[in-house]
Image (cartoon, rainbow, N blue to C red):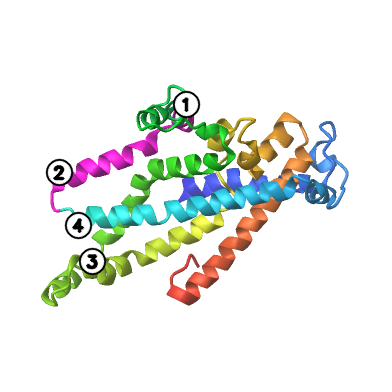
């Protein structure tokens, strides 16, 4: 237990003390603790900024869209694989669906750009053969969200399905035998045996996913951003990066990041309490 505990203490908990930067007017010479206090100045600056509503809206919309798409797909994949009788075919499907998880973000973005290029992308070439004009997927604000979300589903579904397959492996075999004796069909077996068996794992993953709604991944969105899709692709994390590192406004960026973390904390506590009351499964 010692190595992971040290990791969290050194890299997670100790840096939390520097969150006071959000309430200070940071001066490089004076340092974090020597800089003067300014209270909620930077929080007010953020909410007074006309782009604040757009940032929150874009972050929430993409996060909820991703949650709605990425949560059920691994469950469906795991249930389907659990029904496959051929061990060789099952392993092949697992390998094919699991492999994309190991593609780095930069390579993944390159693949997306090549596939969806307006002129030479394989997707638009296929559309042209069907008599449909080329679509600038990454240049369209509305298309950007779907490209981002479904490419993420494709990349992570196989990895996430492993958790549910492990949960299915722990289901009591006598339940399957009883369902077979009762004459249950495959669909009935899935509904009455498989789904209850993976429900605890599904609830935990859902709680953790909701707790990260406002912490949408920065790298992939930032690399896919361009001047055409900025209307829907600018989210809180990319804005914090631009304001904090590129513009050297560290106090303002820290304030926005801290606000983001507080919202995530509130969400995970809320969803955990709801899950405890509804399903008796929770993180604590």
User: On residue 88, which mark appears?
Assistant: 2
Q: For the residue carrying disc 3, how many other residues have a C-alpha within 10 Å: few (<14), some (14-19), or many (20+)?
A: few
Q: Look at mark 1 in the image and give the residue it sits on.
A: 117
Circle 3/circle 4 CB separation < 8 Å: no
Task: Of the two numbered discs 1 and 2 on the same chain, state the one appearing first in sequence.
Answer: 2
**Residue 72 appears in the rendering:** yes
Q: Look at mark 3 in the image and give the residue it sits on.
A: 187
Task: Of the two numbered discs 2 and 3 on the same chain, state the one appearing first in sequence.
Answer: 2
Looking at this view, is 251 or 284 the one in front?
251
State yes or no: residue 108 in magenta.
yes
Q: For the residue carrying disc 4, how many other residues have a C-alpha within 10 Å: few (<14), some (14-19), or many (20+)?
A: few
Q: For the residue carrying disc 1, how many other residues have a C-alpha within 10 Å: few (<14), some (14-19), or many (20+)?
A: many
Q: Nearer the viewer, mark 1 or mark 2?
A: 1
The magenta segment: 85-110
Task: Of the two numbered discs 2 and 4 on the same chain, state the one appearing first in sequence.
Answer: 4
Quick one: SS at disc 3? helix
Q: Quadrant of residue 72?
A: bottom left
Q: Nearer the viewer, mark 2 or mark 3?
A: 3
What distance separates the C-alpha of mark 2 from that of mark 3? 23 Å
Quick one: SS at disc 1? loop
């Amino acid at each position: 237990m010692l190595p992971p505990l040290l990791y969290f203490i050194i890299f997670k908990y100790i840096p939390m003390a520097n969150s006071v930067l959000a309430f200070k007017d940071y001066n490089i010479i004076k340092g974090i603790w020597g800089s003067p206090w300014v209270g909620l100045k930077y929080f007010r600056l953020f909410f007074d900024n006309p782009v604040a509503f757009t940032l929150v809206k874009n972050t929430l919309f993409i996060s909820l869209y991703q949650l709605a798409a990425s949560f059920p797909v691994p469950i469906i994949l795991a249930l389907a694989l659990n029904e496959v009788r051929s061990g060789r075919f099952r392993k092949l499907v697992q390998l094919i669906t699991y492999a994309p998880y190991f593609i780095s973000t930069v390579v993944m973005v390159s693949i997306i750009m090549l596939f969806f290029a307006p002129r030479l992308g394989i997707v638009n070439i296929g559309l042209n053969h069907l008599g449909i004009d080329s679509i600038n997927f990454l240049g369209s604000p509305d298309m950007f969200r779907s490209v981002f979300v479904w490419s993420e589903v494709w990349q992570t579904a196989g990895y996430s399905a492993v958790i549910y397959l492990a949960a299915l492996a722990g289901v009591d075999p006598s339940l399957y035998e009883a369902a077979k004796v009762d004459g249950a069909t495959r669909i009935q077996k899935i509904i009455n045996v498989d789904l209850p068996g993976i429900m605890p794992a599904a609830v935990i993953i859902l709680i953790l996913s909701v707790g990260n709604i406002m912490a949408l991944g920065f790298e992939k969105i930032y690399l896919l951003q361009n001047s055409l899709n900025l209307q829907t692709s600018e989210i809180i994390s990319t804005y914090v990066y631009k304001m904090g590192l590129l513009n050297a406004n560290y106090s303002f960026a820290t304030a926005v990041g801290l606000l983001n973390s507080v919202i995530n904390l509130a969400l995970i506590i809320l969803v955990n309490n709801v899950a405890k009351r509804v399903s008796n499964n929770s993180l604590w």
